[in-house]
């Protein structure tokens, strides 16, 4: 004789009555969560430095052809890039969207170690020191130095940043995207590349929203006393930004 499937709540009651080791999850028990805050994500600076320092003695210096240029290999996308000083920005290949910018020392390209798709490219800031290690060679060094846990920590950070971007940028209003970028800019303002980048340019490079729209919202937030700008750069968020606009 067939039995009717139990609802989630009925299953929770049954398993509790039977003394089940793990309590079934009911929608009533699920916590209400807000959007991920960028402060909740820990940057793996220690792990990146360990990987960078281990690979550096085996790397080849990369000669840049200009003050600010893409760093790429003509032969393979399976390359790890070591940026010892300065900063590196990550760009989406198909539309040149700037995804992020990080100061050195950093190792770029870990996500392509096993399956190089070439969906992103990197740009180093002016006067930065860059070198590279072929992917297969890098993997053997990482194994020898027992650094895979550090690699996992870096890749976990990458996943968390992707979740952050999805929550704040995908299918959101223009204002909510700009709001998230204002907070992100303040969090990353110590990065050398941002010290020369105005807030409007930063938002436009990382979202592809129109300059006029960004400028209009920034101006109104400044007039409302929510933010302070100086010479085009965001210097302070003076009070909590409104959720909607």
Image (cartoon, grey):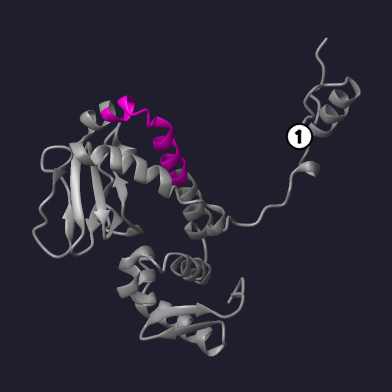
In the image, taking residue 227 as reference, residue 188 lies left or right, namely left
Where residue 148 sits: x, y (%)?
A: 39, 31
Q: Residues within 10 Å of mark 1 (few under 14, many from 20)?
A: few
* Image quadrant containing the N terminus: top right
* Image quadrant containing the C terminus: bottom right
Residue farthest along the top direction in this orientation: 1
Viewer-closest of 66 and 131 = 131
Residue located beneath label 1 in the image: 25
Q: Main secondary structure of the magenta part?
A: helix
- Note whether 32 is above or below 16 in the view shown: below
Where residue 52 sits: x, y (%)?
A: 30, 43
Viewer-closest of 209 and 51 = 51
Is residue 93 visible in the rendered image? The answer is no
What kind of element bears circle 1?
Answer: loop
Viewer-closest of 181 and 58 = 58
Residue farthest along the bottom direction in this orientation: 223
- Asked if residue 155 is among those painted magenta in the image, a careful observer would answer yes
The segment highlighted magenta reads 141-158
In the image, taking residue 66 as reference, residue 200 lies left or right, namely right
In the image, taking residue 33 as reference, residue 152 lies left or right, namely left
Where residue 240 sits: x, y (%)?
A: 61, 75
Viewer-closest of 236 and 50 = 50
Q: Residue at x 80, y 22 (%)?
A: 21
Where residue 113 sits: x, y (%)?
A: 29, 34
Q: Residue at x 48, y 71 (%)?
A: 182
* Quadrant of residue 75 within the rendered picture: top left
Q: Residue at x 88, y 19 (%)?
A: 18
Is residue 189 visible in the rendered image? The answer is yes
Residue farthest along the right direction in this orientation: 17
* Quadrant of residue 149 within the rendered picture: top left
């Amino acid at each position: 004789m067939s039995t009717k499937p139990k609802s989630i709540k009925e299953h929770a009651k049954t398993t509790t009555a039977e003394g089940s080791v793990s309590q079934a999850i009911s929608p009533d028990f699920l916590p209400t969560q807000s959007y991920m805050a960028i402060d909740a994500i820990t940057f793996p600076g220690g792990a990146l430095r360990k990987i960078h320092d281990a690979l550096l003695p085996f790397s080849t210096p990369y000669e840049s052809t200009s003050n600010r240029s893409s760093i790429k290999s003509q032969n393979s996308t399976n390359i790890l890039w070591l940026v010892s000083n300065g900063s590196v920005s990550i760009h989406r290949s198909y539309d040149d969207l700037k995804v992020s910018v990080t100061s050195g020392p950093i190792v770029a390209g870990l996500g392509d170690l096993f399956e190089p798709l070439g969906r992103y490219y990197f740009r180093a800031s002016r006067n930065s020191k860059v070198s590279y290690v072929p992917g297969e060679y890098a993997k053997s060094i990482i194994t020898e130095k027992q650094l895979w846990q550090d690699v996992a920590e870096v890749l976990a950070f990458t996943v968390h940043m992707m979740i952050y971007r999805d929550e704040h940028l995908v299918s959101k209003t223009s204002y909510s995207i700009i709001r998230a970028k204002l907070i992100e800019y303040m969090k990353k303002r110590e990065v050398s590349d941002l010290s020369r980048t105005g807030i409007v340019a930063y938002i436009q490079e990382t979202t592809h929203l129109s300059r006029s729209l960004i400028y209009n919202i920034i101006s109104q937030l400044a007039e409302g006393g929510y933010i302070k700008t100086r010479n085009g750069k965001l210097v302070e968020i003076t009070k909590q930004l409104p959720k909607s606009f």
